Amino acid sequence: MLTKSDLEKLAQVRLEGALFLLQAHRLSSAYYLAGYAVELALKACIAKQMLPNVIPDKELIKAIYTHNLYSLLSTAGLRPQFNEEIRADTQFAVYWMIAKDWDEESRYAFWDQDHAAALLEAVNEPNHGVFQWVKRYW
């Protein structure tokens, strides 16, 4: 069982791991962990919605067990804030276009320096990065 706090910590650890791996030129691993950090951050937002002593709707449970970032964004209830951010911040919109292509199958691909660095920047950039944006809603 993972708590919201566990998911937040795991997300941060995965992002830190991705940054370390990028510096170590372990590009495919860095790419995968960067996207996984965003997935975990979104799941932390979803965990915030869980009520004690209430059995969640079956469809909600199924929706949580996806790796699709766009679907998780909706499940987290962040679509209105996301749409507003996309309109207000063109750099965030560019970063989202990079990050949204990540999926769990990324772990089976070989990623080069350009792709890995681009995803890490899109995820971790302090003012417009996707991970940084999701953290606002933990």
Image (spheres, rainbow, N blue to C red):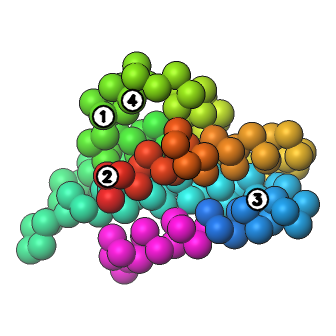
Q: Earlier in the sequence, mark 3 or mark 2?
A: 3
Mark nearer the N terminus (4 vs 2): 4
Magenta span of residues = 1-14
Circles 4 and 2, Cβ within 8 Å, touching? The answer is no
- State the CA–CA distance, disc 4 to disc 3: 26 Å
What residue is drawn where x is 27% and y is 48%?
Answer: 59
**Which quarter of the figure has residue 138?**
bottom left
Mark sitting on residue 34: none
Q: Are marks 3 and 2 in contact (CB under 8 Å)?
A: no
Label 2 close to label 1 by CB (< 8 Å)? yes
**Judging from the image, what secondary structure is the residue with disc 1 in?**
helix
Q: Residue furthest front?
A: 127
Distance (Cα) linking label 4 and label 1? 6 Å
Residue 112 in sight in this render = yes
The reply, left or right, for residue 49 in relation to residue 130 is left
* 66 part of magenta stretch: no
Amino acid type, label 2: Tyr
